Amino acid sequence: MEHLNRLDLPAWLAHCAAVFEHSAWIAEAAWHQRPFASVDQLHRAMMQAAASASLEKKLALVRAHPELAGGESLTVDSSSEQGRLGFNRLSRAERDAMDALNRRYR
């Protein structure tokens, strides 16, 4: 945490922007609250930034997250997460069902 607390904004974003995928504004909001004594405190600051955001930013956050079992290009973290959950091993029928669910969700 000591290292993170000393970073300027561009370096901070290079380390933390991907915590909330495609939503670097959350990491930027947290940067202004440094220093953090723990990862838990940093996490709370990021969660507070998301929770206190405007409706438009909240919608952008949800829309920025990749679909489950979606066909779009995934970040390394999302690909790993979806792989651990088995979304890369779905049958054709299961993928079709997920596509329908993703469409309904959006």
Image: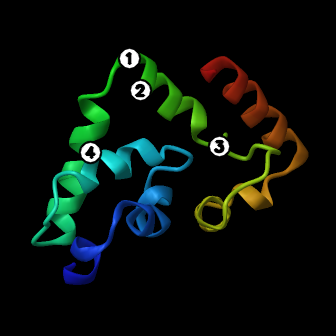
User: Does 97 sit above or below residue 30?
Assistant: above
The residue beneath circle 4 is: 47
Crowding at dot 2, Cα within 10 Å, few <14 / some 14-19 / many 20+, comes out as some
The residue beneath circle 1 is: 55
Residue sitting at x 73%, y 47%? 69
Residue type for callout 3: Pro
Tell me how many marks there are: 4
Relative image position of residue 30 (x, y in whole percent): 26, 51
Residue type for callout 4: Met
SS for callout 1? helix
SS for callout 3? loop
The C terminus, quarter of image: top right
Question: Among all residues in the image, which is located at the extreme left?
Answer: 37
> Nearer the viewer's eye, disc 4 or disc 3?
4
Q: Quadrant of residue 83?
A: bottom right
Relative image position of residue 88 (x, y in whole percent): 76, 60
The residue beneath circle 2 is: 58
> Is residue 38 rendered to the left or right of residue 31?
left
Q: Give the Cα separation between the discs numbered 4 and 3.
A: 19 Å
Relative image position of residue 29 (x, y in whole percent): 29, 45
Circles 2 and 1 in contact, beta carbons < 8 Å = yes
Q: Give the Cα separation between the discs numbered 4 and 1.
A: 15 Å
Circles 4 and 1 in contact, beta carbons < 8 Å = no
